[in-house]
Image (cartoon, grey):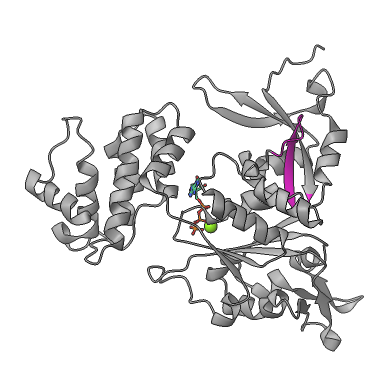
Amino acid sequence: MSKQKLSPDVLCKVEKSGNRFNAWDTDGVKRTSEISTTTRKRAFENDSYLGRFPTSTGRTYWRLVPKDAVDTEPLNTASNEEISSVDVPTEHAEVLNFIHSSYSLKPKALMMNELKWKYLVRSAVRGKNIMMTGPAGCGKTMAAKCCVNALERPDFYFNLGATQDPRATLIGNTHFSQENGTYFSESAFVKAIQTPNAVILLDELSRAHPDAWNILMTVLDYGQRYLRLDEQDGQKTIKVAQGVTFVATANIGNEYTSTRVMDKALMDRFTIVEMDVLTEDDENSLLTYMFPNVDTKVISNVAKIATLTRTESNSETARITSGISTRTTVELCGLLFDGFSLEESSEVTIYPQYDSTGGVDSERTFVKQIVQKFCDDGSSDELFNEDEMAEAEEESY
Ligand SMILES: Nc1ncnc2c1ncn2[C@@H]1O[C@H](COP(=O)(O)OP(=O)(O)OP(=O)(O)O)[C@@H](O)[C@H]1O
Ligand SMILES: [Mg+2]
């Protein structure tokens, strides 16, 4: 039987590091951030490679490539191993060089200014507890993951916003069996903190249960660095291994009512890296880079709409509580790419985020006015008269 001819333009091998699956291409470049977790995990479990294939529209997608479907051994595994085992340098001159040349490790798809990125990398290299802050959808999780990917160290991911039972997630569970009686099984977090040089991502820490914050207090304290397994007899404690770095994310700001107010003592244990909300220019560059096939004029309108809402939400007389996030503009451009109009895309991605109570005075009506101004295909019924729109624009500055 002849082998199926496959022609991926990039071929990757997947390796397990901590509880994450990293993808390395033939040149030893880490592609983890370009491929979904599920796909990487599937490739690892099926002992397959991952290939990147172009589509007819100029985009690319990743899929599993069986190892015996490629004619020649494509991967220079020796160089991969070499790269994955490179430790962050310890000599001061090397550290300086690493930090100051680290901007090249930032993926193009992440929009973050050079100083902030270097500060993030520096804090990670120096073993600080890092807290990424900023409003929803501004790239906190993405930046934290990219930073973790840039450092060749074992990495672990925990989403604390999604856990119902912080004790089970961070410490472990007590079980009972007929033979052994009561016994304790440690959590993945216990294993993570005992891995030297691990980088541990604590996503959505601000949404975590206060019990999680209490458990983490001693772990994050530079003077203590231990976890107490108080479920166990004798109050056994686990020491945090040498070189472990924590990177947390938090939505901090008074508009996030669903986010608990984080304990001051816990916040004090972190070095804060604030993610900036993108400027109109940066938003435009990011969207143009991500969606090269979408009309640049429409993309620039999306960036304008987002910026207008952000400016308005920060103004003293704000009529909307939050601006449109980059997560939303990316989602919206995905719809434009799939042939929806700006008006249709806004209707399904933007409007549902704004309250419609209050009719013409509602937040939704206000945002609609801004969007409508940029939907000038002539076919739409004018929802608002020109004066109203002009007023909306003026007041949003
Ligand atoms: N600065 C940015 N650069 C590039 N893409 C971004 C940026 N900010 C947001 N995005 C886009 O938005 C998506 C969501 O970003 P991310 O999950 O990092 O946000 P977040 O700040 O963690 O949000 P949340 O507060 O809801 O957890 C990303 O997958 C990316 O497509
Ligand atoms: Mg996040």
Q: Quadrant of the C terminus?
A: bottom left
Q: Is residue 14 left or right of residue 282?
A: right
Magenta residues span: 17-30
Front residue of 245/216: it is 245
- Which residue is at 77% across, 29% downward? 26
Image height check: is 151 above or below 380? below
How many marks overall?
0
Query: Quick one: 346 or 198, which is closer to the camera?
Result: 198
Q: Is residue 26 magenta?
A: yes
Q: Residue furthest top?
A: 2
Note whether residue 153 is visible.
no
Q: Quadrant of residue 364?
A: bottom left
Q: Is residue 245 above or below residue 283?
A: below
**Residue 104 % position (x, y):** 63, 41
Farthest residue in the right direction? 179
The residue closer to the viewer here, 190 or 68, is: 190
Q: Residue at x 20, y 30 (%)?
A: 377
Q: Residue 48 is drawn in which quadrant?
A: top right
Considering depth in this image, is 284 or 375 the residue closer to the camera?
Answer: 284
Q: Residue at x 77, y 53 (%)?
A: 93
The answer to whether residue 316 is left or right of residue 59 is left
Determine the residue positioned at 33% across, 45% down.
Answer: 348
- Give coordinates of residue 299: x percent, y percent: 35, 35
